[in-house]
Amino acid sequence: MAYDVTQLRALIQRLRSPLRLAVIHGGDKTQPGAVIYPTHNPRSTKTYHTVAKDIAEALREVGFEQVSLLADDMTLPQTLKQQGIHLAWLNTGGVQGYDPVCHTPAMLEMLGVPYLGHNPLNSSILDNKHAFKRELQALGIATAPFMVAHPFQGPFNPQTHPQFQRLFGDYRGAFVVKPVSGRASVNVFVVDEVEGLGEAVANVHRLTANTALIETYLPGREFCISVSGPILHREGVFENHGTPFAFSAIERVLEPQERIFTSMDAKGMSQERMRLLSGEEAAEGRLRSQLEAIGQEIYQAFNLTSLVRIDLRQDEAGQLYVLEANPKPDLKRPTAHSTSLVAQGLEQHQMSYHDLILSLLGDRLHQLLSHQPHLIPHIQALIRS
């Protein structure tokens, strides 16, 4: 079928009744029937059920009549088949095992179920900080110097490690040691002296049974920028901006003596912990433009097809460096008392939470209809019926 973006509003209106959507949250490996054998997940476990519920409720509120909330576990393929799900929305970090963020998109591709979320390769690259940073270096995008220490290579000794000496031999500042795959700033250590690196690396190995990343500590301000595809919904209309949509440029406010942002598990996200960059002052406007440009460059260079949040930090001279990417940023619905780093800046663009949900859904359908219609014959049949 022929398609152009001016048809998107009418197509989504047509799909609101017949389209069967599933919002998928992380499974619980301790539940009977969830997995064959419960094993280890190096990424600290979280089901994201509450946020998945927010997304599902928003989809119902904008008119979709058949929305299911499903757990990401061994039962998922059969449930998708039984319910005749046409399109999945991924809000899961995986269940267990290594590189769990890529497991579900890989399974859905095998099953032939289209989804909103990053493809398996990008999911894994974005979630593995060392792989992501290597790609950044190849692209010429600034990121702090780093190396990794693998647990099966024995205790880490910076004094005798040749790569460490090549990279950091003349460096006399602090280091950050963290898991290569993680969430919410869990198990992240600031190490002031080289002599403390061995213990910090050993702690990451012990806590995660996974690779540790060692990078130079950046003492400046910390920021994040959210980026999605070019299709936006606002004021009842879908628009194609032609370039990735960069929004919610935010400074993460550090408290006195807080050298890295405290884990959201220990201290929930609140209005006091973030500051939206308004751009009203010239310097702040330039900073916001820099953040947006970096986010858009990453989105295009990695050929991303779903929402991502990029975290950055300045050095002592104010130079921005990319810290990491979050392939599944928090899509919590804002309330009077809490919000998310993604949703905080929507009002700057005359958008609501519902607009964001429709933008992400519309952008994915636009991608599929424009470039990969062979993946969605079942959805095209719904549109024609």
Image: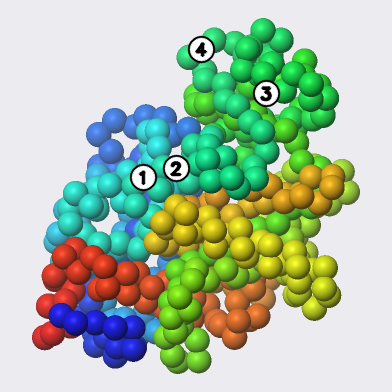
Q: Residue at x 75, y 64 (%)?
A: 287
Disc 2, SS = helix
Q: On the image, numbered disc 4 is attached to which residue?
A: 153
Q: Which residue is mark 2?
A: 125
Marks 4 and 2, how far apart in space?
22 Å
Residue 190 percent across, percent down from the top left = 75, 32
The residue tagged 1 is 121
Choose the circle earlier in sequence order: 1 or 4: 1
The amino acid sitting under disc 2 is Ile
Tag shown at residue 167? 3
Colour option used:
rainbow
Quarter of the rendering containing residue 187: top right
Q: Amino acid at mark 1?
A: Leu
On screen, residue 101 above or below 60: above
Tag 1: Cα neighbours inside 10 Å, few (<14), some, or many (≥20)?
Answer: few
Q: Earlier in the sequence, mark 3 or mark 2?
A: 2
Q: Position of residue 198 (x, y in %)?
A: 68, 16
> Left or right: 315 with respect to 74?
right
Can residue 329 be seen here? The reply is: no
Q: Which residue sits at x=41%, y=30%?
A: 40
Contact, mark 2 vs mark 1 (Cβ under 8 Å): yes
Dots 1, 4 in contact, CB < 8 A = no
Kind of residue at disc 4: Gln
- The residue depicted at 63 percent of the width and 12 percent of the height is 162
Check if mark 1's residue and mark 3's residue have beta carbons within 8 Å: no
Residue 156 seen in the figure: yes
Q: Marks 4 and 3, how far apart in space?
A: 19 Å
Q: CA distance from mark 2 to mark 1?
A: 6 Å
